[in-house]
Amino acid sequence: MLGTLGWIPFFANDIGPLTGGYLSGRLVQAVRTALFSRKSIMTLGSILVAIGALCQSASQTWTVLLFLSISTFGVGVYAGNLHALPADAYPFKSVATIYGLAGSAGAIGGILFNTLVGYFSAQGDYFVVFAVLVLLEPLAVAALWMWLRDPEHHREP
């Protein structure tokens, strides 16, 4: 059954960035700044990821697939806007540096999180792993809203 249905959450993840990019573009057209639009859509994505975490209590195949697909769709919505964020928030000459720093921080975070997942899994405490997964994106979005403001300057070409 996994072979016939396992592709569905991955397909939802593939549709996420396209949908997230489209929605943020529509918000920009509605006379919002690009940064505000991206942060808003990333907030929506993080909520979808949290909703998808409800699959812990799902027992039927279709409900597990539904919740996983919602979550992976939310990850895609979030990621699609996250990757465009430095270009909207920082001066042209700083974008590559900011993107590199963010990538490095993500790699370090991945190392730490994988270590924690291994530790808690060995203890049989999967709830902590799912709780951290549910909280990571909302905490990241909260940090974006608190610390990343619209630039006062216009980007150079």
Image (tube, rainbow, N blue to C red):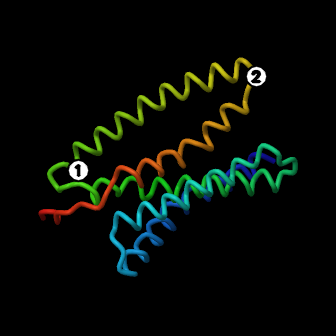
Q: How many marks?
A: 2
The quarter in which the C terminus is drawn is bottom left
Q: Nearer the viewer, residue 43 or 116?
A: 43
* Disc 1, SS: helix
Q: CA distance from mark 1 to mark 2?
A: 42 Å
**Farthest residue, direction right:** 60
* Disc 2, SS: loop
- Are the residues tagged 1 and 2 within 8 Å (C-beta)? no
Q: Which residue does the image show at 16% across and 63% down from the upper left?
A: 153
Mark 2, other Cα within 10 Å: few <14 / some 14–19 / many ≥20: few
Mark 1, other Cα within 10 Å: few <14 / some 14–19 / many ≥20: some
Q: Nearer the viewer, residue 92 or 35?
A: 35
Q: Which residue does the image show at 12% across and 63% down from the upper left?
A: 156
Q: Which residue is mark 1?
A: 95
- Up-down relation of residue 49 to residue 115 (above or below): below
**Residue 45 at x, y percent in the picture:** 55, 58
**Residue 132 at x, y percent in the picture:** 61, 36
- The amino acid pointed to by label 1 is Val
Q: Which residue is mark 2?
A: 124
Q: Nearer the viewer, residue 113 or 148?
A: 148
Q: Which residue does the image show at 23% across and 50% down from the upper left?
A: 95
**Residue 63 at x, y percent in the picture:** 81, 55
Q: Is residue 64 left or right of residue 94?
A: right
Q: Earlier in the sequence, mark 1 or mark 2?
A: 1
- The amino acid pointed to by label 2 is Gly
Q: Is residue 9 left or right of residue 21?
A: right
**Farthest residue, direction front:** 146
Q: Which residue does the image show at 59% across and 58% down from the upper left?
A: 73
The picture quadrant where one finds residue 89 is bottom left
Mark drawn on residue 19: none
Q: Is residue 62 left or right of residue 129?
A: right
**Farthest residue, direction left:** 156
